[in-house]
């Protein structure tokens, strides 16, 4: 399926709002979203914030990948929460959850959660936007 461009409005922790361009590709069992600093993307030298969301059961969407590649222009800009809002709009009525590091709880063999991702989710819990399920070692967006 061809990517659909959209504008992603992101607000950082200081309250500054920026608009990034995002390309959403629905691949049937979920969506890939690439967030670009430049629009249109420059083929030879464009970088992007990459994300993937997989449908894992009838009422859930799993965050399978969030990767800003450590680039300053994507770090701490509020892109991750804006992506979560976008995915909730694309898949209404489904809960958004994150990967588990517990082998027994994994739905996808390759799933894992990095230290950086853990910090993002703990911050969301602290703000009341997510909850942690210790028996599954998973975070769920509320």
Image (cartoon, grey):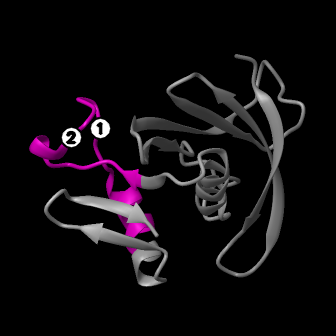
Residue at 70% over, 16% down = 1
Q: How crowded is mark 2: few (under 14 residues within 10 Å), some or many (20 or more)?
A: some
- Farthest right residue in view: 40
Q: Which quadrant holds residue 115?
A: bottom left
Label annotation for residue 133: none
Q: Left or right: 53 with respect to 74? A: left
Query: Is 130 above or below relative to 21?
Result: below
Residue under label 2, please give it.
Answer: 106
Which span is picked out in magenta? 97-122
- Farthest left residue in view: 104
Please report contact status of discs 2 and 1: CB closer than 8 Å, yes or no. Answer: yes
Label annotation for residue 111: 1
Residue 94 lies, in percent from the top left, at 49, 51
Viewer-proximal residue, 14 or 106? 106
Residue 65 lies, in percent from the top left, at 46, 40
Residue at 20% over, 49% down = 101
Q: Left or right: 62 with respect to 66? A: left
Query: Is 107 above or below relative to 76?
Result: above
Residue 61 lies, in percent from the top left, at 45, 45
Residue at 46% over, 82% down = 128
Residue at 69% over, 72% down = 12
Magenta stretch: includes residue 11: no
Secondary element at image label 2: loop
- Closer to the eye: label 2 or 1: 2
Residue 75 lies, in percent from the top left, at 61, 58
Q: How crowded is mark 1: few (under 14 residues within 10 Å), some or many (20 or more)?
A: some
Viewer-proximal residue, 119 or 88? 88
Q: Left or right: 30 with respect to 113? A: right
Q: Left or right: 13 with respect to 109? A: right
State which tag comes first along the sequence, 2 or 1: 2
Rounded to the nearest angstrom, the CA distance separating label 2 from label 1 is: 7 Å
Query: Is 42 above or below relative to 140?
Result: above
């Amino acid at each position: 399926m061809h990517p659909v461009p959209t504008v992603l409005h992101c607000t950082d922790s200081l309250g500054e709002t920026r608009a990034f361009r995002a390309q959403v590709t629905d691949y049937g069992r979920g969506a890939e979203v690439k967030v670009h600093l430049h629009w249109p993307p420059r083929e030879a030298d464009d970088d992007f914030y990459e994300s993937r969301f997989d449908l894992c059961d009838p009422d859930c969407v799993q965050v399978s990948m969030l990767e800003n590649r450590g680039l300053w222009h994507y770090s701490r800009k509020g892109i991750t929460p804006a992506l979560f809002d976008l995915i909730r709009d694309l898949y209404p009525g489904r809960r958004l959850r994150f990967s588990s590091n517990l082998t027994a709880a994994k739905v996808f063999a390759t799933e894992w959660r990095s230290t950086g991702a853990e910090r993002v989710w703990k911050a969301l819990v602290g703000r009341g936007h997510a909850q942690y399920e210790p028996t599954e070692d998973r975070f769920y967006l509320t």
